[in-house]
Amino acid sequence: MYILSLSFTIWSDEVIVCRVLHEILSPEGTHFQGNKYLKKFIKDVLKMDMSEEELESAKVFREYRIDNNRRIDIAISTINHFIPIEVKIYAGEQANQCFDYAKTAKNSKVYYLTRFGDFPSDYSANGLTKQGNGYLEISCISFSEDIINWLESCVSQSETIKIAPIREVLFQFMMTIRKFTNQMEDEKEMEIVDILMKSPENMKSALDIQSCVNQARVKLMKQLFAKIESKVGRVKLENEYDYASDDYKNCNDFYKYKYSTYPGISYEYKSKVKPNIDIWVRIEIDNRIFIGYCCPLDGKSVKQALTKDEIEQILGVKTHIDDWWAYWEYVPDGNDELCPNFKAANDAYLKLFNEPSLEEFTTKCAEKIIELLNK
């Protein structure tokens, strides 16, 4: 079965999570269960009623392309509905993303799937209709409850119980979700919970430690950028996108919100390649850290102002377009698995708290920036 080959150790990787989710939902998936899982998803998770005839017409898409080079993570299309589903585990939000998705919906809301069922920010939903704490055009669903409950229902199906490979994939996927939604099943974690429950003093100590954790993480971020800046040794651009601007606001606020504040450092590469359009070499943290070329318009982050052909002609690189980014890659070596994740705190990130590892990593970042600047 195809999805058995996926690595469930990369539990915070949204690409893999979406791939598995799509495979389970798709009537053409290699589980050979037709639309059984999709029917339960539409009824139990999306809370929508559909006739058997319409369910038979359903198709499920992954990374469905729409205008402005947007890609909807999961889309369900039937004869009467088009249902966009945006998946957010740790990735940052994009400007007007949910607003753009809402324009594609047909007889449906945008379903916003996060770890705990949070609403998108104004940054993503700008232009939608405010309603209470959320938006009229958005319906929030969660991995922690909605998806777990749906998967448990799928596993309980008589045909699923009989087929060990399918059953095991669903169990693995549930285990993966419980991992990134902090649903503690691990024996050691339960021991810690028991210790915390034993006295007020134990809980107070834990809370004191918790209050210092994000302070330490912010301090590491500032150190990392300062080291990179020093090792690059060139004059950076002083602007609102810099990690140190406004008394380090982008760093200080990074862990206050579910979306990213995008702290980074920018260097001028080419100015006025077209009227009011510059090209910068920039290093930035979304959740992971990456380096590349971005193309501001009048010094501001906007949707890509250059065409693919213009980018390739000016920069001589294969395009990797994402909003104002013309090209980007993860650090180190373009490998997302080895790239530190500043929200999920993967192993690559935790190594940065070791001084020699931090020195090695910041050296690699600086070398990559210099390489791009010298092209």
Image: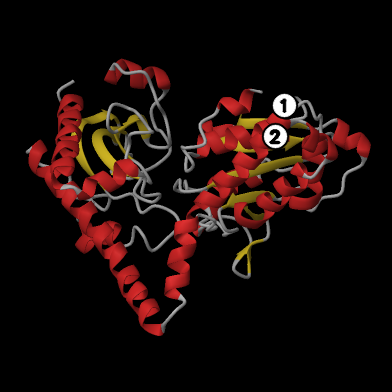
Looking at the image, which is closer to me, 205 or 281? 205
**Residue at image location 14% in from the left, 23% down from the top:** 374
Going by the numbered disc 2, the residue's amino acid type is Ile
Q: Are marks 1 and 2 in contact (CB under 8 Å)?
A: yes
Q: Which mark, by number, is residue 29?
A: 1
Going by the numbered disc 1, the residue's amino acid type is Gly
Q: Locate residue 109, reporting x and y percent.
A: 71, 50
**Residue at image location 74% in from the left, 51% down from the top:** 45
User: Does label 1 or label 2 sit earlier along the sequence?
Assistant: 2
Dot 2: what SS? helix
Q: Which mark, by number, is residue 24?
A: 2
Q: Residue furthest bottom?
A: 200
Q: Quadrant of residue 216?
A: bottom left
**Residue at image location 14% in from the left, 35% down from the top:** 363
Dot 1: what SS? loop
Above/below status of 73 relative to 2: below
